[in-house]
Amino acid sequence: MCFMLGTASAVAESGGAAGPVFGYFDPATNGFTPAGGAAALLMKTHDAAPLAVTAAVVRRGTLVITVNVGFLASFPAGATATASVTVETVPAASADPSTATSILASAQIRRSGSTGVATLSIPYAFSTTATTDKVSLDTIVYSSNGDYASLRQTIPLPADGATTRVTLSQRL
């Protein structure tokens, strides 16, 4: 077991008031290892490697999502249906997950016989960590009688200034 602690040994060794030295004490070996990396930066020591700063990748544009619905024969003629889409950036596994951006949009499905369509035009401004980040489209189609269906699709991060069209199909 190791403990994080501060020690005044740096003050005694340097002869000045350098402040505490943060690090790890291992009681099994009675050894002390000074902290490095981010912990050293937080403690304002100067021997830590600088943190990598990545410039944000900003993409603005419009997603046009068309949801085609095939209604089953058992679907009530008077029931209404809605399509809801959650659009979310998916940062790379090594990125801070708090960089994800999420947008929710809904539209009524216009029904004609056994088919229906909803078109959602979603303006976006994504600030992501890399051009290789993905965008997840989580779609739920639900009706006034309690039926629902869901679908998840992932697309590449759209180009800046683009109108990106995606067509999804679902049965209800």
Image (cartoon, rainbow, N blue to C red):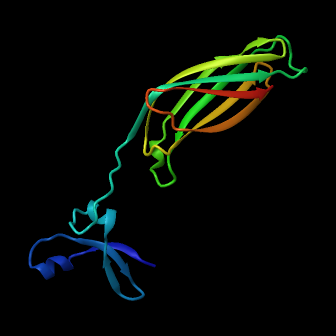
Report whether 76 appears left or right of 81: right
Residue 102, given in percent of the width and then of the height, sits at 52, 34
Residue 121, given in percent of the width and then of the height, sits at 56, 20
Q: Quadrant of residue 71?
A: top right
Report whether 85 appears left or right of 129: right
Report whether 99 appears left or right of 147: left
Whether 103 is drawn above or below 8: the answer is above
| Residue 116 appearing in the image | yes
The residue furthest right is: 73
Report whether 171 appears left or right of 131: right
Of residues 125 and 19, the one nearer the viewer is 125
Name which residue lies at 77% across and 13% down.
111
Name which residue lies at 28% across and 65% down.
49
Residue 170, given in percent of the width and then of the height, sits at 76, 28
Whether 105 is drawn above or below 4: the answer is above
Of residues 172 and 144, the one nearer the viewer is 172
Whether 125 is drawn above or below 114: the answer is below
| Residue 124 appearing in the image | no
The residue furthest left is: 15
Name which residue lies at 53% across and 23% down.
122
Of residues 6 and 52, the one nearer the viewer is 52
- Identify the image quadrant of the C terminus: top right
The residue furthest bottom is: 29
Whether 138 is drawn above or below 35: the answer is above
Name which residue lies at 20% across and 66% down.
46
Q: Quadrant of residue 110?
A: top right
Residue 156, given in percent of the width and then of the height, sits at 55, 39
Q: How many marks?
A: 0
